[in-house]
Amino acid sequence: MTQVKSKAISIRIGPRKLALLAKLVRGKKTGDALNLLRFMPQKGARILEKVIKSAIANAKNNYKMAVDHLLIKQAFVTQGFTMKRMQPRARGRGFPIKKRTSHLTVWVGAKEEV
């Protein structure tokens, strides 16, 4: 069974926030997943929607797969680099700020016939 991958690297959102959305759409049909993400208020929903659309386009154009029968086989998030910044505080101190990034990978494939 052919599976098609699409990736987004160094996204400026924390991996835990994005992983919640990836877990939500894993195993769903691509059309259902896009409808679900379209009405969600999270920033990560827009990002995940873009990556899913890219995976669908890859499957359609590169592998001539039928768009109607595609499922999200895998969707996972890994941690990217962390930008370290300092927040000035009283008495010359500084508190660290960690600005986390994520890598998002989505695999789509055709539904298996039983």
Image (tube, rainbow, N blue to C red):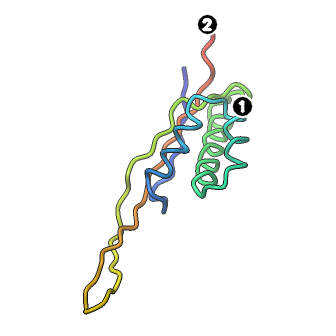
Residue 81 place in picture, x, y as percent: 35, 60
**In the figure, 33 relative to 3: above or below?**
below
The Cα atoms of the two marked residues, 1 and 2, are separated by 19 Å
Q: Residue at x 37, y 52 (%)?
A: 79
Mark toward the viewer: 1 or 2: 2
**In the figure, 47 relative to 77: above or below?**
below
Residue 17 place in picture, x, y as percent: 49, 52
Instruction: Report the front residue among 108 and 40.
Output: 40
Instruction: Report the front residue among 11 and 95.
Output: 95
Q: Residue at x 67, y 28 (%)?
A: 65
Q: Secondary structure at mark 1?
A: helix
Q: Residue furthest front?
A: 90
| Quarter occupied by residue 41 | bottom right
Q: Residue at x 72, y 35 (%)?
A: 31
Tell me the kind of residue under disc 2: Val
Residue 40 place in picture, x, y as percent: 67, 50
Pointer 1 residue: 67
- The first of marks 1 and 2 along the sequence is 1
Question: Mark on residue 114?
Answer: 2
Tell me the kind of residue under disc 1: Val
Q: Is residue 33 left or right of residue 26?
A: right
Q: Residues within 10 Å of mark 2 (few under 14, many from 20)?
A: few
Q: Residues within 10 Å of mark 1 (few under 14, many from 20)?
A: some
The quarter of the image holding the N terminus is: top right
Task: Tell me whether the residue at label 1 lies in contact with that at label 2, contact meaning CB atoms closer than 8 angstroms.
Answer: no
Residue 33 place in picture, x, y as percent: 66, 37
| Quarter occupied by residue 114 | top right
Q: Secondary structure at mark 2?
A: loop
Q: Is residue 16 left or right of residue 59?
A: left
Question: Mark on residue 58?
Answer: none
Instruction: Report the front residue among 4 and 80.
Output: 80
